[in-house]
Amino acid sequence: MALLQRPFAYARYAIAGFVLLTLASMSLYPGGTYRDRDSVGYLFFSNFLSDLGMPRSWGGHANPWGALLFVSGEVLLAIGLVAFFVGIVRLSSAVRPARIWGRLAGLVGIIVALALVAAGFTPANRVLSLHMEAALIAFRGAAVATAFLAVATAQDRRFPRRSMAVAMVIAVVLAGYAAVIEWGPRISNGDGLRFQVTAQKIMVVVAMAGIAYLSSVAERLSQEPPSSPPIDETFSLPTTR
């Protein structure tokens, strides 16, 4: 099974698939934002990504195919995240100091994937409270998972130092976006809506690019043969002829 044999490659394919399906869904979105029900089409800085998953847009127009594409992309992304974190658990298990942190990252990462699917199947215009709860669990959990991942890469000397830096940047950006949702400007006014939507887009770009990079590094490391321990020549016995 490709997901288990090449988990890191599958994670990158899933990210690419999510991006393509999201772009296709944007092209089909009929129009309407949380504040302006008469707008036409998808407005990049006024429509949340979750607007794409609504079977009926904020403008009251049917959006069945766009919603199907976006929710399919979310499910694909969730499976990709599971593959990524399963791969991290396997890779980190070979290094004792990194093992526990890799397992913690994997556990929280699976919870994030489940929350992401839950957010996809709870449209914002029908069950907004459930959608927001699932989304917050996903964002908060992803920040925790990538923080654990940063520690795991720091403890595993096979990873380059920039891997830990990338994981920490993802964690900080995710945590920052979760804070913006709770304490940032309200979407009840135009500036607040644009601020929240823009913050979401930045978070998604950083997270997707960061995970794609980390999966590439992890895949390369997983394909390297295990290194043999160094020979201690101090206690080597002299050879006799």
Image: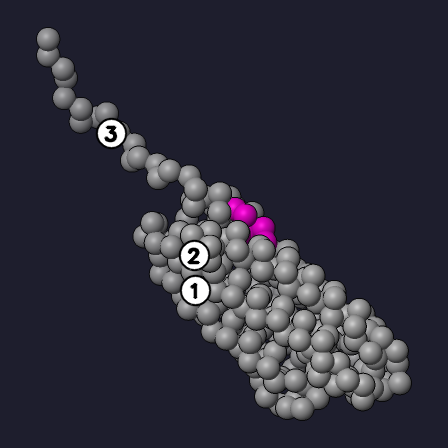
Task: Give amino acid for label 1.
Answer: Gly
Q: Residue furthest left?
A: 241
Q: CA distance from mark 3 to mark 2?
A: 41 Å
Numbered disc in front, either 3 or 1: 1
Q: Secondary structure at mark 3?
A: loop
The residue at which mark 1 appears reads as 106
In the image, which disc is placed on residue 1? 2
Quarter of the image where the C terminus is located: top left
Query: Seen in the image, is 77 located left or right of residue 50?
Result: left
Residue 215 magenta-highlighted = yes
Residue at horizontal 73%, vertical 75%? 66
The residue at which mark 3 appears reads as 232
Q: Residues within 10 Å of mark 3 (few under 14, many from 20)?
A: few
Q: CA distance from mark 1 to mark 2?
A: 19 Å
Which region shows up in magenta?
212-217
Q: Earlier in the sequence, mark 1 or mark 2?
A: 2
Q: Residue furthest top?
A: 241
- The spot of residue 22 in percent (x, y) is 70, 67
In the image, which disc is placed on residue 66? none
Quarter of the image where the N terminus is located: bottom left
- Above or below for 202 versus 155: below
Residue at horizontal 80%, vertical 89%? 60
Task: Give amino acid for label 2.
Answer: Met
- The spot of residue 21 in percent (x, y) is 68, 65
